[in-house]
Each structure stands twice: as structure tokens, then as C-alpha cells.
Image: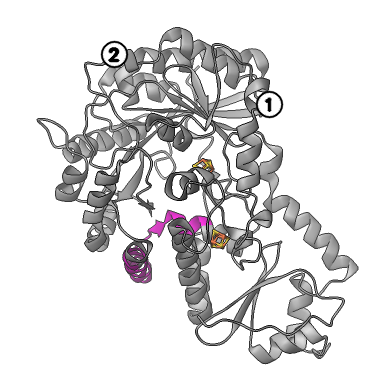
């Protein structure tokens, strides 16, 4: 894309907007309420100089979308910005509990700095679990989600069980809602644990990196195929939902795919595996650098450009499948499209402004230390405790949320104040990650344009806007469907 030139603003009714010039010469302009319009260079010139014909359809479109300000459009602008930013009024809703660092798998890209199965010193104690839940219930959100992570959280089943029962007790006493998610490789499940999880409405999420050869290569398990374990349990859990009469279009095991170097040439096989297993969504997550040594990154990592080539090819394939009537969508694209095409706020921690660090999510380590997010905890496992904001044995929620690092991360992820992001056309849809910046560039503030995470976000949004620009009504209709997320919150509920 060429370096754009833009005429000086002469029109006092022009609202604040950002722009990006595309390869066909047209400009994409966006504003804070997330509206966008395509303009030819001539139309952009006339718009900025106040020379647009007031009776032209373009003038009406720019007014309706808040680019030309009237008293009505200003009121609409304020209301829509408020709606798109409603995460600011919620407080931390996601609380991640690291029940143990032990794990029975040896994933090649493990972010969690796993420990061997015999190292019980890395388990959370019941006392630390109780103190963690007490802090969680000091936080203000009327509805809380507790997510069990590790290591492999099922290794410390006693703590999982205790937390579910204790959190329900506090929720009942305080008249609040609480949901649970277990993020697990599933291999340590048994019938009794599964009954407990379903009876208590615990949502289950796992990893599926592709067909057996790829998954087993990425996620080796001593003496067994991790793919076969995951698939066997996924099918068993989904059958259990069905036999208990749950709506199986809403109640199913979630899965995430982490893209390693080996996946880059197998995007279509990965999508086929998800379809074969009955998924309607595939989440193609780039590898992140947390928990990695340099050597591991050399082995498993790749450039932003390599990832984007993979991503575009996989999503092109998904679109082809949609046209054949096969229902499947890609999650990152869905999140961006929801921000681009609707005013809904998916409140995805890494794509919000400011990001979710501490004010949207908090991570509680096995030893009681509290972190801004799970990624901040992973950095601490590599030797830097910058993102530690307290300890459940000593601090209250108030101490934790007022820790200096919380303010620093808010500032460092507030897009309006960041060089590069402040003027970027994708500002209304995007998010930055200060922990990633710190890990990769040694600074909480992204050093653009060399920041690979920004390159990926920008590349994905360029791709989506190009689809919208070139695809006409058929593509718009197809991508609109990716923004529809059915509410699954009421599906998993405790059996009283
Ligand atoms: S991270 Fe990159 S793509 Fe996103 S708003 Fe900032 S500059 Fe734009
Ligand atoms: S710092 Fe990064 S990982 Fe942590 S919440 Fe923010 S965006 Fe997410």
C-alpha cells in the first residue's frame, strides 16, 4: 500500500476519523464508533474540503455513519462508543486459577513452563485455593468466571473440586453468578470426574492441533497418542451432554488450535479435522513467545508474514466450504468482524482497548502469587516478576487492583495514546498486548512497525476488509453469519 496524502481539513463538520489507503487507490476511513466507508481519492478530497454535494448518497452515508457531524449523529456516536466499550464498566470477570504446574504431556511449544509429574511442590494447596476464591469474590463483577488451567489442572483434582464447591457456596451467599471452565488435555478424566464436572456446569475446553500426526507431534504424551486420548474423551463428553438432554448445538467441548511451524503447510488439513470432529468454529491461534527459550522459538516459531500466508489460505478454504453449505468459521476473524460489522462487544481480553490485564482478567498462580493475566504469569516463570500484582496470602482485591503495574498496563494498552495505533484505521477494532511487547521488544509499549503482533493484526484486518470490499453482497452476507454468536451461558448449569 502506497504512502497516502490527505488534503488539509477545511470542513468544520468533519468528525474525527482515521484512514488507510488500499492497493486499488481507495481509502478506507473509520471512526471511533467503528463505522467505515470506502472513498476514492477525489471523494476524500471533497469530503475534507467540505465540497461534497449535500444531496449525494455519499453525503448521507457519511452523515449516517458519524463522519459528518450533526447534533443527531453526535448523540448516536456517544451512545455507540459507550456500547462498544462496555467492558470498562464490568471489572475483572475472568479469574484464571493455576491448580498445578505439573503435566503429563510434553508439548513442544508449552507456554506454561510445565513441571514433571513427580514434582508435587508445584501444586496449589487447598488453603491457597480458598484464599484465591476469597479474593475473586472481593472483586465487583456480579457474574464471575473461574477458569482452571495448569500445567494440566486435572492433576490436582482435589483443588478443582474444592474451588467449584466453595465458589458456589460464596456465590449463593452473595447472590452472584459464577461459571467455570476447565482447560485440559482431557487424558486424566474418568467417569466420576466427568459426572462431577457436568453436574456442576463446568464448561470443558481442550486443544486440538489437527489430525493425529500433527497433533501428536506438537503434543507428545509418553506412552500414548494424545490425539487419540483427546478425541476419545471429547466424544464421550459430547455423548454425555446428549444423554442428559442438553442442547448439543450449544453444549459441546470447545477446542483451540495452536499454530506451530509444522502447521504452516497443513492449514486445510487442520480445518478438515475440525469439520470431521463436528466443530462449527476453528480458532487459529499464532504461537506466542511466552514460556519459550530462544532455542525453542527458533525451532517452533515463524515470522508474521509466514503466519499470514497460512492464515489467509486457511480462511479462503473455510469460505469455499461455506459456499458448499458447510458451516464453519474462524474465531479470530469472527472477533474482528463482530467489531467491524456490529456494535457488539465480545470482550475478548487481547482485542479490547485497554486490554484485559487485571481490569478484565486476573491469574492466580499455584503458590498464591497473583498476576495481571496468565501471560504475565508465564513471563514470571521465565524469571521476571514484573507482572506480579500481589499474593492471596497477604493482599486484598483492593491492594491487587491498585498495584502500580495495573495502571502501567492500562496505559500501555490504551490505543488512543500509542504511537502507531492512535492514527491507525484499525484502532476501533484492535488491541495490543503489553506483555507480548515486553517479552519481544523489552518495552511495555509496542515499538511499531517492527512489532510482529501488530503485523499479524494488521494483516488479518487488511485481508478481511479486502474480502468485504471485493466480495459484494454475497461475501457480506456470508461474513455477517460469522458475527452471530449464540449465547451458551445458560447451557452449563449446576444440577441442584
Ligand atoms: S496494533 Fe497495529 S493494527 Fe492494531 S491498531 Fe495498533 S497499529 Fe493498528
Ligand atoms: S497483557 Fe496481553 S495477554 Fe495480558 S490481558 Fe493484556 S493483551 Fe492479554
Where 278 sits versus 454, above or below? above
Residue 178 circle label? none
* Percent coordinates x, y for residue 273 in the rendering: 24, 53
Where 199 sits versus 203, above or below? above
Residue at the far left in the pictured view: 223
**Residue 85 seen in render:** yes
* Percent coordinates x, y for residue 66 in the rendering: 77, 69
Residue at the far top in the pictured view: 127
- 104 sits to left or right of 483: left
**Residue 142 seen in render:** no
Q: Earlier in the sequence, mark 1 or mark 2?
A: 2
Residue at the far front in the pictured view: 442
Distance Cα–Cα, label 1 vs label 2:
33 Å
Q: Name which quarter of the figure residue 240 lies in.
A: top left
Residue 60 among magenta residues:
no
Q: How crowded is mark 1: few (under 14 residues within 10 Å), some or many (20 or more)?
A: few
Instruction: Considering the whole magenta stretch, tell me its main secondary structure.
Output: helix
Beta carbon at label 1 within 8 Å of ligand 2: no
Nearest the camera: 181 or 419? 419
Q: Which type of secondary structure does the marked residue at label 2 adopt?
A: helix
Q: What stretch is highlighted in magenta?
A: 309-335
- 47 sits to left or right of 180: right
Q: Which of marks 1 and 2 is in front?
A: 2
Q: At 90% across and 67% down in the image, what residue appears?
A: 71
Residue at the far right in the pictured view: 71
Report the residue marked by disc 2: 120
Report the residue marked by disc 1: 140
- 363 sits to left or right of 67: left
Q: Which type of secondary structure does the marked residue at label 1 adopt?
A: loop
Beta carbon at label 2 within 8 Å of ligand 2: no
* Percent coordinates x, y for residue 440 in the rendering: 43, 49
Amino acid at each position: 500500500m502506497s504512502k497516502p496524502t490527505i488534503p488539509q481539513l477545511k470542513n468544520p463538520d468533519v468528525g474525527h476519523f482515521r484512514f488507510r489507503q488500499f492497493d486499488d487507490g481507495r481509502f478506507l476511513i473509520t471512526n471511533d464508533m467503528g463505522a467505515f466507508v470506502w472513498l476514492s481519492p477525489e471523494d476524500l478530497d471533497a469530503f475534507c474540503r467540505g465540497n461534497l454535494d449535500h444531496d449525494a448518497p455519499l453525503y448521507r452515508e457519511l452523515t449516517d455513519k458519524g463522519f459528518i457531524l450533526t447534533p443527531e449523529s453526535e448523540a448516536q456516536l456517544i451512545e455507540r462508543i459507550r456500547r462498544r466499550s462496555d467492558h470498562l464498566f464490568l471489572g475483572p470477570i475472568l479469574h484464571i486459577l493455576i491448580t498445578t504446574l505439573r503435566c503429563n504431556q510434553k508439548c513442544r511449544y508449552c507456554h506454561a513452563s510445565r513441571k514433571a509429574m513427580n514434582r508435587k511442590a508445584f501444586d496449589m494447596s487447598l488453603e491457597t485455593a480458598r484464599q484465591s476464591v476469597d479474593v475473586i469474590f472481593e472483586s465487583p463483577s456480579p457474574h464471575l468466571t473461574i477458569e482452571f488451567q495448569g500445567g494440566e489442572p486435572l492433576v490436582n483434582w482435589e483443588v478443582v473440586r474444592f474451588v467449584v464447591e466453595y465458589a458456589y457456596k460464596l456465590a449463593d451467599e452473595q447472590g452472584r453468578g459464577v461459571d467455570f471452565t476447565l482447560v485440559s488435555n482431557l487424558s486424566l478424566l474418568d467417569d466420576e470426574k466427568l459426572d462431577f464436572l457436568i453436574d456442576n456446569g463446568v464448561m470443558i475446553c481442550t486443544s486440538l492441533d489437527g489430525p493425529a500426526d500433527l497433533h501428536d507431534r506438537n503434543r507428545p504424551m509418553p506412552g500414548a497418542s494424545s490425539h487419540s486420548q483427546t478425541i476419545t474423551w471429547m466424544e464421550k463428553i459430547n455423548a454425555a451432554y446428549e444423554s442428559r438432554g442438553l442442547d448439543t448445538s450449544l453444549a459441546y467441548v470447545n477446542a483451540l488450535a495452536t499454530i506451530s511451524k509444522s502447521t504452516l503447510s497443513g492449514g486445510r488439513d487442520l480445518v478438515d479435522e475440525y469439520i470431521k470432529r463436528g466443530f462449527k468454529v476453528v480458532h487459529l491461534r499464532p504461537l506466542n513467545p511466552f514460556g519459550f527459550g530462544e532455542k525453542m522459538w527458533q525451532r517452533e516459531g515463524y515470522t508474521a508474514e509466514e503466519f499470514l500466508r497460512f492464515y489467509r489460505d486457511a480462511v479462503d478454504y473455510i469460505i469455499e466450504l461455506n459456499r458448499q453449505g458447510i458451516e464453519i468459521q474462524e474465531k479470530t476473524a469472527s472477533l474482528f468482524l463482530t467489531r467491524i460489522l456490529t456494535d457488539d462487544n465480545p470482550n475478548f481480553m487481547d482485542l479490547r482497548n485497554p486490554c484485559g490485564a487485571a481490569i478484565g482478567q486476573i491469574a492466580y498462580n499455584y503458590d498464591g502469587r497473583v498476576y495481571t493475566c496468565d501471560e504475565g504469569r508465564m513471563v514470571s516463570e521465565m524469571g521476571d516478576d514484573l507482572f506480579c500484582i500481589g499474593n492471596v496470602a497477604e493482599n486484598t482485591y483492593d491492594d491487587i487492583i491498585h498495584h502500580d503495574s495495573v495502571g502501567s498496563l492500562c496505559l500501555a494498552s490504551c490505543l488512543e495514546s500509542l504511537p502507531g495505533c492512535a492514527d491507525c484505521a484499525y484502532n476501533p477494532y484492535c488491541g495490543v498486548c503489553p506483555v507480548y511487547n515486553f517479552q519481544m521488544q523489552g518495552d511495555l509499549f509496542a515499538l511499531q512497525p517492527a512489532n510482529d503482533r501488530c503485523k499479524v493484526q494488521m494483516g488479518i484486518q487488511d485481508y478481511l476488509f479486502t474480502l468485504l470490499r471485493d466480495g459484494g453482497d454475497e461475501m457480506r452476507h456470508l461474513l455477517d453469519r460469522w458475527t452471530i454468536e449464540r449465547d451458551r451461558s445458560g447451557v452449563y448449569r449446576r444440577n441442584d
